[in-house]
C-alpha cells in the first residue's frame, strides 16, 4: 500500500516537472519570436529608410539637372555669355548672396509636408520648391568656391548649383556640383579656319568673287577685332597652307591680305586644341548634349536655324545644298560638303576625318569659325581603339596624334568664310552648362 502511494507521489512530481519545462520552452520560444519580430521590424524600417534616402538622393540629383537647364535658359534670356547677371538675380532684392549649404533645412507642417526650405533669406532659387511624389526639392545658384560662394562677380566661368531634396518621412539629401560655361569646355576658336595636325591640305579656291576674312563678322562686328584667316600648328604647316592661297586679294585680316593672313598658331593657340585625346573626349561631351544626334542619313531639316540654333552632332558625313540656311554648333566626324548656295552661322567642328569640300556655283556662306582635326586613325572612324594612334594604328608609339586634314574649295561663284563672334556666341548660348566636381553633403 505504501509503495502505491509512493509511486503516485513520484508520478505527480514528474507531471509537475514536465509542466515547468513546457512553460519554460514556451516562454523561450515567445522571447525568440518577439526578438525575431523586432529584428524584422528593424530591418523593415532600415530598408524603408535606405529606400527613402535613395529616393531623396535621386530627387536631389534631378534638382541639379533642372537647375542646370534653368541656368542655361536664364543665360539665353540675358543675351550674353557672362554670368554676373545670373548671380545678381539669384541674390534677390538685398543684392547679397545669403544661401548657406551648411544650414539649409526643410520645414515640415503637421502633416509631414515640406512647406519650404530655410537658409537662403531672400535669395531667388533656380528651381523653387517643387513636389514629386512624396518628396520635395529646390535648387540654388551661388558662385564657385574658388571665387567665394557669396561673391556676385564671375571671373572664371564657373558657378555652383546646390539642390536639396526632402521626403515625407524626414530623410533628406543635399547635392552640389560646379558647372562650367560651355566656352570653358570648348576652347576658343583662334582663326576663321584652323587646320590642326601635320601637312594640312588647303585649297582656298580659284574664284575671284570669294571672300575669306578674319575680320569679325566681315568687318561689321566688334570694331578692330580680327584673327588669322587660316591658322596652322607649325611653320612647315603654315607654308603648306600658304600654297592654297589663290587670288590673294580675297584673303583679308585687319591690314593683311594673301599669305600674310595665314599664321602659325602654335605659340598662341589654346593648348587643348593640340591634345588629340582631349578632342576625342570633347567629341564624347558634345555628343552627350546634342540637340540633334545622328548620322549621314539624318535630315538637315532637323538642324538649327538663325534664332533657333541647335547643337548638331553627326557621326558621319554631312551635305548642305542649294538654298539651305542653318545655325548653331555643327560637329561632324566625317566629311562636310557645301554644294551650291548653303549657309551656316556658328562654329563648325570637323573632328574625326577632318575634311571640308565646297563645290558648285552660287553664293555659300560659313560665318563663325571652323576647326579641323583628323583623329580617326587608320580605320577612318572616330570612337574606335585606333583613335589618335597615327599612321601605324598603334597607341603608345612615336607617331601618335593627328593626321593630315583636308580643306578644298571647288567650283565657281562666291564662297564666303568669315570669323564672327556673334554667331559663335549665339551657338554657345544654346549649350547646356557642363557639370564637374559633384559633391554629396
Image: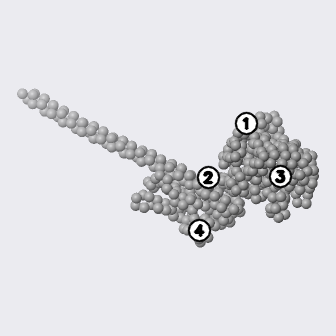
Image position of 304 (left or right of 11): right
Numbered disc in front, either 3 or 2: 3
Q: CA distance from mark 3 to mark 1?
A: 34 Å
Task: Name the residue rendered at 73%, 50% in the picture.
Answer: 326
Q: CA distance from mark 4 to mark 1?
A: 51 Å
> Is label 3 in contact with label 2 (beta carbons under 8 Å)?
no
Q: Around disc 1, counting alpha carbons within 10 Å, would you say few (fewer than 14), some (14 to 19), or many (20 or more)?
A: some
Instruction: Estimate the x, y position of residue 109 in percent, counting from the top left.
Output: 42, 61
From this view, report whether residue 133 is shown above or below residue 86: above
Numbered disc in front, either 3 or 4: 3
In the foreground, 73 or 401:
73
Residue hosting label 3: 417
For marks 3 and 2 on the same chain, the one whose residue lies earlier in the sequence: 3
For marks 2 and 4 on the same chain, the one whose residue lies earlier in the sequence: 4
Q: CA distance from mark 3 to mark 2?
A: 40 Å
Instruction: Estimate the x, y position of residue 106 in percent, counting from the top left.
Output: 49, 60
Classify the position of the C terminus by image quarter: bottom right
Disc 4 secondary structure class: loop
Residue hosting label 1: 385
Q: Is residue 419 visible?
A: yes
Q: Around disc 4, counting alpha carbons within 10 Å, would you say few (fewer than 14), some (14 to 19), or many (20 or more)?
A: some
For marks 3 and 4 on the same chain, the one whose residue lies earlier in the sequence: 4
Q: CA distance from mark 3 to mark 4?
A: 44 Å
Number of the label disc, if any, that sits on residue 92: 4
Disc 3 secondary structure class: strand
Numbered disc in front, either 1 or 2: 1
Q: CA distance from mark 2 to mark 4?
A: 26 Å
Amino acid at each position: 500500500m505504501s509503495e502505491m502511494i509512493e509511486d503516485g507521489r513520484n508520478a505527480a512530481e514528474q507531471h509537475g516537472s514536465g509542466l515547468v519545462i513546457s512553460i519554460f520552452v514556451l516562454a523561450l520560444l515567445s522571447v525568440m519570436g518577439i526578438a525575431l519580430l523586432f529584428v524584422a521590424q528593424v530591418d523593415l524600417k532600415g530598408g524603408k529608410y535606405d529606400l527613402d534616402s535613395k529616393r531623396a538622393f535621386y530627387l536631389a540629383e534631378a534638382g541639379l539637372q533642372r537647375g542646370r537647364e534653368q541656368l542655361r535658359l536664364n543665360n539665353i534670356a540675358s543675351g550674353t555669355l557672362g554670368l554676373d547677371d545670373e548671380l545678381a538675380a539669384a541674390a534677390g532684392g538685398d543684392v547679397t548672396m545669403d544661401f548657406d549649404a551648411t544650414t539649409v533645412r526643410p520645414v515640415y507642417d503637421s502633416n509631414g509636408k515640406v512647406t519650404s526650405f530655410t537658409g537662403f533669406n531672400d535669395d531667388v532659387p533656380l528651381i523653387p520648391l517643387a513636389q514629386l511624389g512624396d518628396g520635395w526639392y529646390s535648387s540654388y545658384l551661388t558662385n564657385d568656391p574658388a571665387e567665394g560662394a557669396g561673391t556676385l562677380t564671375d571671373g572664371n566661368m564657373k558657378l555652383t548649383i546646390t539642390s536639396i531634396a526632402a521626403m515625407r518621412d524626414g530623410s533628406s539629401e543635399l547635392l552640389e556640383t560646379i558647372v562650367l560655361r560651355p566656352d570653358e569646355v570648348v576652347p576658343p576658336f583662334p582663326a576663321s579656319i584652323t587646320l590642326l595636325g601635320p601637312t594640312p591640305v588647303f585649297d582656298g579656291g580659284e574664284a575671284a568673287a570669294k571672300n575669306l576674312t578674319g575680320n569679325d563678322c566681315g568687318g561689321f562686328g566688334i570694331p578692330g577685332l580680327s584673327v588669322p584667316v587660316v591658322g596652322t600648328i607649325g611653320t612647315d604647316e603654315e607654308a603648306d597652307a600658304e600654297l592654297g592661297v589663290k587670288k590673294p586679294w580675297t584673303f583679308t585680316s585687319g591690314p593683311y591680305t594673301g599669305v600674310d593672313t595665314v599664321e602659325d598658331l602654335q605659340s598662341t593657340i589654346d593648348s587643348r586644341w593640340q591634345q588629340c585625346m582631349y578632342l576625342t573626349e570633347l567629341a564624347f561631351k558634345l555628343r552627350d548634349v546634342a540637340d540633334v544626334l545622328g548620322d549621314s542619313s539624318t535630315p538637315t531639316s532637323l538642324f538649327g536655324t538663325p534664332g533657333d540654333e541647335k547643337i548638331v552632332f553627326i557621326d558621319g558625313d554631312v551635305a548642305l545644298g542649294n538654298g539651305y540656311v542653318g545655325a548653331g554648333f555643327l560637329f561632324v566626324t566625317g566629311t562636310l560638303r557645301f554644294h551650291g548656295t548653303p549657309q551656316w552661322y556658328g562654329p563648325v567642328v570637323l573632328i574625326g576625318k577632318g575634311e571640308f569640300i565646297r563645290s558648285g556655283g552660287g553664293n555659300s556662306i560659313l560665318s563663325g569659325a571652323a576647326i579641323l582635326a583628323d583623329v580617326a586613325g587608320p580605320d577612318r572612324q572616330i570612337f574606335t581603339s585606333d583613335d589618335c594612334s597615327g599612321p601605324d594604328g598603334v597607341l603608345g608609339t612615336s607617331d601618335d596624334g593627328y593626321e593630315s586634314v583636308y580643306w578644298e574649295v571647288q567650283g565657281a561663284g562666291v564662297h564666303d568664310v568669315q570669323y564672327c563672334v556673334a554667331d559663335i556666341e549665339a551657338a554657345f548660348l544654346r549649350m547646356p552648362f557642363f557639370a564637374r566636381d559633384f559633391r554629396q553633403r
